[in-house]
């Protein structure tokens, strides 16, 4: 992380206090998390106190204060996916990645998260990886899908 | 500035434009119970205890008096059976979190709230935001803030700021209705900026 890069993200959003969330989203998508030094720089540049940044960074689930993996795996646990076998997919994911929902593996490859509904129930069970939706998957296919992500 | 005329508990009140119902009531010494209100701070509307009833003709409306600004010809009731039940319920929910707070106990007695009505989950903080807002608006140090949301919401000291500013100030301590703030401060102090360490470090 370097200050120049953070400044570039801040400048993209006019650098005013009301663009705080946009700036944080920008940092989050570039680094997959919000490093403390970055938050301090944001507070300094946007003139927002750290208590406020901390409140917002912990309020929204989109932000993370710990490093996340390169690939975000979201397993849908909604009703439709649940009855079509989402718990089995989740167990398989656990075995393959060695991590539980909310965790990140040591190589920073995958972060696993369960979600309540992605909104495409006809495709259940659904797993979303880096924004790409994999529908109607079986436990056997799970390993093949993860293989595509390095 | 023009005056706004309204009635509070049968008393005629001439309030300044932009005043809240609560301030207007206080100006004619009608008391409305509050927890999160503080004259020095901007209206917050967090505890909902200052709820009052507005007469709308054939129906009544419940509004939070600390954030509702006065309007012409309002007819306000500050105590009724329905209001008592609203306040009782709010107090019972708060008492589940801070059963032994003296301030809550006093109000509970007045409104007949049962501290055991809801299962107790002593988290002590009732999210009135007095410490957070006082530090931000009056002291201007922003040493304490909220983190997380919903049932996990809690206050959190910013160690770098708290270590420098809080020991000399502590102005927010008497504001806390449950004493949780003091506990949180001692905990934060012992975990992230212990006294002995910072003192011996400064001697070196």
Image: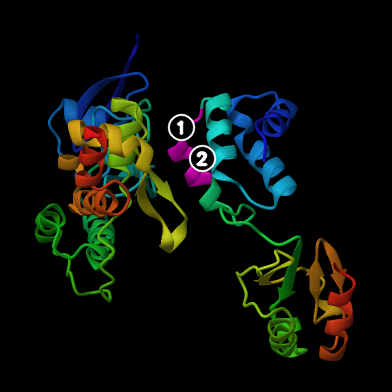
Say left or right for B195 vs B162.
left
Residue B163, horizontal then vertical, whole percent: 29, 38
Residue at 79 percent of width and 74 percent of height: A127
Check if mark 1's residue and mark 2's residue have beta carbons within 8 Å. yes
Pointer 2 chain: A
Number of callouts? 2
Could you tell me which chain the residue with mark 1 belongs to? A
Residue A134 visible in the current orientation? yes
Residue B41 image offset from top left, x and y in percent: 30, 30
Task: Specify the segment rendered in magenta.
Answer: A48-56
Q: Main secondary structure of the magenta part?
A: helix
Q: Is A55 situated left or right of B162 in this image?
A: right
Asked if residue B55 can be seen in this view, the reply is no
Q: Does the magenta stretch include residue B199?
A: no
Which quarter of the rendering shows the N terminus of chain A? top right
Judged left or right of residue B78, residue A43 is right
The image shows residue B54 at horizontal and vertical percentages of 33, 42
Residue at the disc numbered 2: A53
- Marks 1 and 2 belong to one chain: yes
The quarter of the displayed image where residue B68 is located: top left
Please name the residue that numbered disc 1 is placed on. Answer: A49
Where, by quadrant of the figure, is residue B33 drawn? top left
Residue beneath the point at 70% across and 23% down: A14
The circle on residue B26 is none
Instruction: Residue lying at the far top in this picture: please name it.
Output: B1
Residue B133: quarter of image: top left
Quarter holding the C terminus of chain A is bottom right
Local SS, label 1: loop
Magenta run includes residue A55 = yes
Question: Dot 1: within a 10 Å radius of its alpha carbon, few (fewer than 14), some, or many (20 or more) residues?
Answer: some
Could you classify mark 2 by the number of other residues whose Cα lies within 10 Å: few (under 14), some (14-19), or many (20 or more)?
many
Residue A141 place in picture, x, y as percent: 88, 86
């Amino acid at each position: 992380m370097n200050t120049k890069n953070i400044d570039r993200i801040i400048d993209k959003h006019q650098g005013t206090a009301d663009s705080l969330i946009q700036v944080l989203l920008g940092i989050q998508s570039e680094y997959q998390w919000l490093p403390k030094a970055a938050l301090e720089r944001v507070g300094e540049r946007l003139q927002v106190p750290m208590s406020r940044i901390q409140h917002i960074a912990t309020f929204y689930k989109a932000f993370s204060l710990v490093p996340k993996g390169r690939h975000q795996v979201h397993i849908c646990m909604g009703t439709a996916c649940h009855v079509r076998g989402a718990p089995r997919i989740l167990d398989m994911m656990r075995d393959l990645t060695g991590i539980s929902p909310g965790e990140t593996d040591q190589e920073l490859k995958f972060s696993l998260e369960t979600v309540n509904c992605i909104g495409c129930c006809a495709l259940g069970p659904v797993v979303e990886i880096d924004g790409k939706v994999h529908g109607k998957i079986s436990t056997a296919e799970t390993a093949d899908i993860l293989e595509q992500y390095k | 500035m023009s005056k706004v005329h309204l009635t509070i508990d049968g008393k005629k009140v001439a309030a300044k434009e932009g005043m809240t119902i609560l301030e207007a009531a206080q100006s004619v010494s009608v008391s409305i119970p509050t927890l999160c209100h503080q004259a020095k701070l901007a209206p917050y509307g967090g505890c909902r205890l200052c709820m009052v009833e507005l007469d709308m003709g054939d129906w009544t409306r419940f509004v939070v008096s600390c954030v509702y600004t006065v309007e012409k010809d309002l007819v306000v009731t500050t105590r009724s059976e329905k209001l008592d039940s609203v306040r009782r319920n709010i107090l019972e929910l708060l008492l589940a979190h801070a059963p032994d707070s003296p301030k809550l106990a006093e109000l509970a007695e007045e409104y007949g709230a049962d501290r055991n009505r809801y299962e107790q989950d002593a988290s002590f903080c009732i999210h009135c935001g007095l410490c957070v807002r006082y530090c931000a608006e009056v002291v201007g140090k922003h040493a304490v803030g909220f983190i997380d949301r919903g049932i996990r919401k809690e206050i959190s000291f910013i160690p770098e700021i708290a270590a420098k500013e809080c020991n000399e100030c502590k102005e927010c301590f008497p504001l806390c209705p449950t004493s949780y703030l003091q506990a949180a401060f001692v905990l934060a102090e012992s975990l992230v900026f212990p006294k002995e360490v910072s003192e011996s470090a400064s001697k070196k």
